[in-house]
Amino acid sequence: MTTLNSTPRTDGFRMPAEWEPHSQTWMVWPERPDNWRNGGKPAQAAFAAVAKAIAEFEPVTVCVSACQYENARARLDHDNIRVLEMSSDDAWVRDTGPTFVTNQHGEVRGVDWTFNAWGGLDGGLYFPWQRDDQVAGKILEIERCARYRTEGFILEGGSIHVDGEGTLITTEECLLNRNRNPHLSREETEQVLREHLAIDKVIWLPDGLFNDETDGHVDNFCCYVRPGEVLLAWTEDPHNPNYPRCQAALRVLQQARDAEGRQLIVHKLPIPGPLYASEEECAGVDLVAGSQQRSPGVRLAGSYVNFLIVNGGIIAPSFDDPLDEQALAILQRVFPEHRVVMVPGREILLGGGNIHCITQQQPAPQRA
Ligand code: KQY
């Protein structure tokens, strides 16, 4: 594996927007029983449905442990899905996989951020996480992509969204959390992002969604749909704990100018629920010291914003909620050129995230 000492920006690479063409999408098979109920079986069915939905639009690679190889290979029965053996600690490739960067000469490289399971020993979700920290490097090696490693700089892919034209959106709750990079100031954090993603402007939302166990990843709350336009998870209900978060985010977005000097158009996407795990669902999760415990009293951070853009499609979660239909209609309106496909997202939500969190797009090589 080639690890470079330079940065993507100095080498002429940038992070493309998610709607730019992909060569494939990566996933990791879920199995750890202290995160996924009933030994991961319901989650495996949910991940297989997501993989098959994506595979209708572009190739998918699913990484799976040796123990689960045969089962995963059998359940991922689709011509467009490749299954590879790889060890990991869990199944959140948005956060453990590389952030791919491209240049104008058809080259694709990857940024391998340091991963600490969303907070390390200060609020992180499990220990150890060393195999997860190796996932990005392994994927880059499989793809023969050169690697930039940010040793000691913690970041998860779900904590950033870019417009591909120089602007990045994130949250203070996550990136400025003392359990990520407490040795860096906001400006120093921005500098690492500028160098590794070739962005020129960071828009800081104060918080992500209420009870998001990632410390407020932006990909569960707000995302770009095209340059100058964002989707924001939204509630009009002042009693919803997300109300002040949505209001604060809207204020920032309305006042922001992006790297091109544009004001943003903000589309609102309703928040489903309130959603809670049932007693039975929580009882199916193994109890392990140091891992995230599940309780029926805790409101789940369900969000329709947690979708993936693929070549010609949008793969979005549904929650068997009265708002599913409205969310589908909004997504189809803001993505008129894409076919919006909803896949049940509850099982993934029970594990702490959703479709965007369990996928990582690999951009197609680009030529000027
Ligand atoms: O949402 C994500 N990006 C990851 C969530 C991790 C949850 C682990 N229980």
Image (tube, helix red, strand yellow):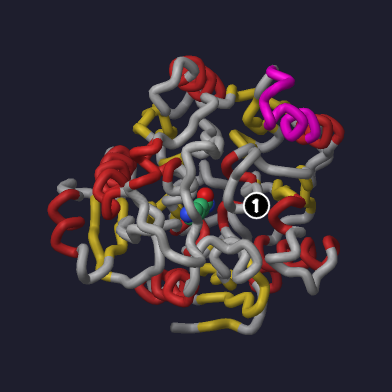
* Residue 179 on image: x %, y %: 69, 65
Q: Name the residue at 64% across, 39% down.
A: 209
Where is residue 241, by image quadrant?
top right
- Nearest the camera: 261 or 221? 221
Residue 133 appears left or right of 220: left
**Residue 164 appears in the figure:** no
- Nearest the camera: 59 or 131? 131
Q: Name the residue at 44% across, 83% down.
A: 1
Residue 239 appears left or right of 251: left
Judging by the rendered image, the residue that carries numbered circle 1 is 215
- Nearest the camera: 103 or 188? 188
Please, what is the three-letter code of the amino acid marked with disc 1?
Asp
Q: Name the residue at 53% across, 83% down.
A: 3
- Total tally of numbered discs in the picture: 1
* Residue 314 on image: x %, y %: 43, 34
* Residue 299 on image: x %, y %: 55, 35
Residue 243 is a magenta residue: yes
Residue 84 is a magenta residue: no
Residue 162 lies, with reference to residue 226, above or below; the image says: below
- Segment colored magenta: 237-248
Where is residue 11, by image quadrant?
bottom right
**Residue 317 appears in the figure:** yes
Residue 190 appears left or right of 37: right
* Residue 356 on image: x %, y %: 48, 45
Residue 67 lies, with reference to residue 304, above or below; the image says: below
Q: Name the residue at 83% across, 61% down.
A: 186
Disc 1, SS? loop
Residue 269 appears left or right of 83: right
Where is residue 85, by image quadrant?
bottom left
Quadrant (top left, top right, bottom left, bottom right) of the C terminus: bottom right
